[in-house]
Amino acid sequence: MVNKIATLIVVGVLSLAGIILFGYNEFVTIDKLQDKPVEYEIVTKWQLPEVLDEVSGIDWIGANKLACIQDEDGFIFIFNLETSRLEQKIKFAGPGDYEDIRIVENTAYILRSDGEIFEVRDYLSNNPKTKSYSNFLTEDQNLESLAWDKSNERLLLAIKDKEPKDDTYKGIYQFSLNSKELQKKPGYRLYMGDSLLKDRKTKLHKKLEPSALAIHPGNNSFYILDGRAPQLVIADSDMKLKKRYALREDDFAQAEGLTFSKNGRIFISNEGKGGKANILEVIFK
């Protein structure tokens, strides 16, 4: 009996060691850029109220206000950057894993992780109307990124986890705001073997895991946020990767949301992850 207990203890210790050793590259990325000087400056930090501890998406709506969502309940929250207070709470759907939000004039579009898109017309009114659009994507792709491409009248959805049949790239799919349909062929591809990602010592499909996607209002560059092992990647208007910033985990505990003001100020939101959720205004050098 003693030998059996001792054997179970040894097996348990070895199993735990295996999890620590072999699970390391699954969740923590060795990144050579982490040893370089910080290439960004945090200008301002806003702590968010407890109801937004799971903040998952933000978008600029003007007048120093952001529309925010969290990944558990179907509400849009309006946060005032000047007063650091929530001004409004708008219900659009029931509980769900909501991941990003984009405001197009008087309509809010919210992305759920299984690819479902929720359209909330007159979202700031006393009587907002919600309609949802399903498509061929599923929770296996785990979508967290929604961008508004104003010039082409479309939304762009970036896959976070895996393409169904190919680990070498992650598709960015186009949702037409006219037809309200998602094109089956990706409009862009993020190639995991890109030379800009070579220092990420992890599995191929984990080189870049988009948690937010936004288009710079000045030059139409794509800004791709990765919150798991935090980094920001900038691509040109053809989605060719140009620049990568390693983000310090002390600053970006779980970066999930990204938006620009009309004049190009950059805001990134972080879930609480053991502390207070926040919104940061950041300047990248």
Image: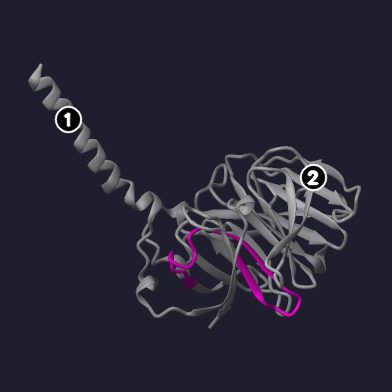
Residue type at numbered disc 2? Phe
Write the residue at 83% across / 61% down: 104
As displayed, is residue 124 above or below residue 7?
Answer: below
Q: Which residue is mark 1?
A: 9
Image x and y of residue 207, in percent: 46, 58
- Residue sitting at the far bottom: 285
Residue 218 or 275: which is nearer the viewer?
A: 275
Task: Locate residue 197: give its quadrant.
Answer: bottom left
- Label 2 – label 1 distance at C-alpha: 51 Å
User: Which one is nearer the viewer's eye here, 245 or 5?
Assistant: 5
Quadrant of the rendering where the N terminus is positioned: top left
Q: Say which residue appears at 36% left-offset and 60% top-offset.
A: 201
Q: Is residue 166 above or below residue 258?
A: above
Does 262 lie within the magenta span?
Answer: yes
Q: Are marks 2 and 1 in contact (CB under 8 Å)?
A: no
Task: Give, as a three-letter code, the residue at label 1.
Answer: Ile
Residue at 57% across, 63% down: 225
* Rendered location of residue 196, percent (x, y): 47, 70
Q: What is the magenta range?
A: 245-268
The secondary element bearing badge 1 is classed as helix
- Outermost residue on the left side: it is 3
Is 255 contained in the magenta span? yes
Does 173 sit left or right of 283 as displayed?
right
Q: Which mark is residue 92?
A: 2
**Mark 1 Cα-neighbour bin, 10 Å: few <14, some 14–19, many ≥20:** few
Q: Which mark is residue 203?
A: none
Q: As rendered, which of 188 and 255 lies closer to the eye?
A: 255
Q: Position of residue 171 (x, y in %)?
A: 62, 54
Mark 2: few, some, or many residues within 10 Å (few <14, many ≥20)?
Answer: many
